[in-house]
Amino acid sequence: MTPCVDPVCTSVLHSGTTTVSAKPPLTVLGSYPGVKCFDNFFIPFPASQTSWLSGLLAFWWFVVEFGHLNMEHHGFYELVISANLSLLLMPLTTSAPHPNLLPPLAFVRRKCLRSSYRKCHGEVDWFSLSAVIGLLCFAPFIVFYFVMACDQYQCSISQPVVELYRGEATLLTIWARAPSVTWTAAKIYAIWVAFQVRERWRAPSLINKYEINGLQCWLITHVLWIANAHYLHWFSPTIIFDNWIPLMWCANILGYAVSTFAFLKAYLFPTNSEDCKFTGNVFYNYMMGIEFNPRIGKWFDFKLFFNGRPGIIAWTLINLSYMAKQQELYGHVTNSMILVNVLQAIYVLDFFWNEAWYLKTIDICHDHFGWYLGWGDCVWLPYLYTLQGLYLVYHPVQLSDAHALAVLLLGLVGYYAFRSTNHQKDLFRRTDGNCSIWGGKPAYIECSYRSADGGLHRSKLMTSGFWGVARHFNYTGDLMGCLAYCAACGFGHLLPYFYLVYMTILLVHRCVRDEHRCGSKYGKDWKRYTDAVPYRLIPGVF
Ligand code: NDP
């Protein structure tokens, strides 16, 4: 496999499961942040500070993550665990040189190595680094804040701040009121992950190929869930809601464990050393990932497993658990809860129905596997993508018929735009433009690009269908769907709208990131395309 990553994925249909192989990737010359960089020297701080900063950060993480393990022996255990893990992490950062050498070394490092780093595409600038550290430090708190706001403040996100301001609560009292991890939650979570691993096992994959069975796993899991709720009664259908915060600690432990394991694995025993991307900055490496396709053995692919399951399969189960809780608490289920369940289930089902397509998206084709995907899939996705259902347990909103109909229409139109746009590109690329889009032969711009080995390659950018309306109309459809989920919760609180805000930031950032990559890849041909289709998301606006 050649180093940098811009794979052209092809799908081959088999009976039962679908095998999607990522063709050996082509190295694209340019400054896309996926470009491999061997500069291991870039350190924005003098070495000793990097060590200390990493140690402190590690200490902080583990205080946060393990602080809830044992409330009775709070301080002592936290300190022991944190100190030990921090010490373990410290040697991973740059070792400190002799103190007398620090000032001149720091100067030389900053001046010389930073410029050599720039040659390596300037990947980790100060802004990116601050963003990376900020996300690593604050993302777990954002998740905690929203879940805690529902648990303790009836989903008001301003109330905790008001109470803190008035001195009626302190960070410690809020923290202490949150349930700690329990054996029940640990067992539920372990069984859940083990079950998903077992289901994944049923479709062992080949090296450099993905063999997928997401739809099958989703169906089996949900059939079992429904059978349990109606006939077997092994556990309560509200089990997820009832253990929501304890489960969050378990998800965090898995999220950090898998990200740290993937990080260490990349140094110690990478699956394919040629597809590793070292930026020279330990935080960036940890967050954005080093290995492109980390695997254990032939069958367990980290990206495929953590991206699809257990997070996305859990999404619909979590919503079902919220629905069951509403029924238990109020004796009925509101139309808003049904709408959220149905619209999000369509989105999730679409994901698994089109799992082969998903393997051609940026996540799989360009991103490396690190904390961003590992922790994000274990914690961020199941906890923040399901906030609407959680909110509706605390605020059972019954929408008027007109409101419900408007939400349903918006959700369905958004889904149609999202699916059709993705389908059009998929069809266009699969048939090399020999297809029908909106009843006619598609128009396109012929492009060429060079790979690092000097080879000249050809490609096409479609200007028909939704790809002629805006350059990322699939994101627009996605955002319409997000707005529908949020609007289903009424207008009483801001909390359910967080998802829309987050997705807007994510997709706009993704759009800019992707266009930066395409601009580097296609050069003046990309300019011709952006002249032909001048808007990104909304024609005439952006
Ligand atoms: P896209 O599916 O939009 O793919 C972008 C790539 O398509 C470009 O890099 C380029 O690749 C190619 N391309 C761009 N313009 C054209 C054109 N006119 N004709 C043909 N090919 C073109 O990006 P994503 O992978 O980000 O998104 C996939 C879907 O996943 C989206 O619908 C998005 O909404 C959804 N999504 C959902 C998320 C969630 O959390 N719910 C998160 C992220 C995405 P090339 O180099 O091959 O030319």
Image (cartoon, helix red, strand yellow):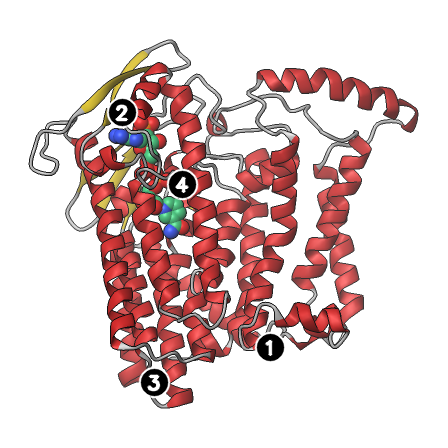
- Mark 4: which amino acid? Asp
- The CA distance from mark 1 to mark 3 is 30 Å
Above-or-below relation of 131 to 105: below
Q: Nearer the viewer, mark 4 or mark 2?
A: 2
Quarter where residue 325 is shown: bottom left
The residue carrying mark 3 is 233
Name the element at disc 1: helix
Say whether mark 4 is within 8 Å of ligand 1. Answer: yes
Calculate the distance from the C-alpha at mark 4 to the C-alpha at mark 3. Answer: 38 Å
Residue positioned most to the top: 454
Location of mark 1 (residue)? 152
Residue drawn 43% across the image and 37% down it: 293
Q: Which mark is residue 363?
A: 4
Point out the tag, 2 or 3, that comes first from the N-terminus. 3
Q: CA distance from mark 2 to mark 1?
A: 52 Å
Residues marked 2 and 1 touching at CB (< 8 Å)? no
- Identify whether 365 is placed above or below 500: above
Q: Is mark 1 within 8 Å of ligand 1?
A: no
Which numbered disc covers residue 230? none
**Disc 3 residue type (three-letter):** His
Residue under pointer 2: 532
Marks 1 and 3, the one that precedes in the sequence: 1
Q: In the image, what residue type sits under mark 1?
A: Gln
Relative height, residue 434 to residue 221 (above, below): above
Q: Earlier in the sequence, mark 2 or mark 1?
A: 1
Question: Residue 378, position in %: x, y?
Answer: 49, 56
Label 2 environment density (alpha carbons within 10 Å; few <14, some 14–19, many ≥20): some
- Give residue 514's quadrant in the image: top left
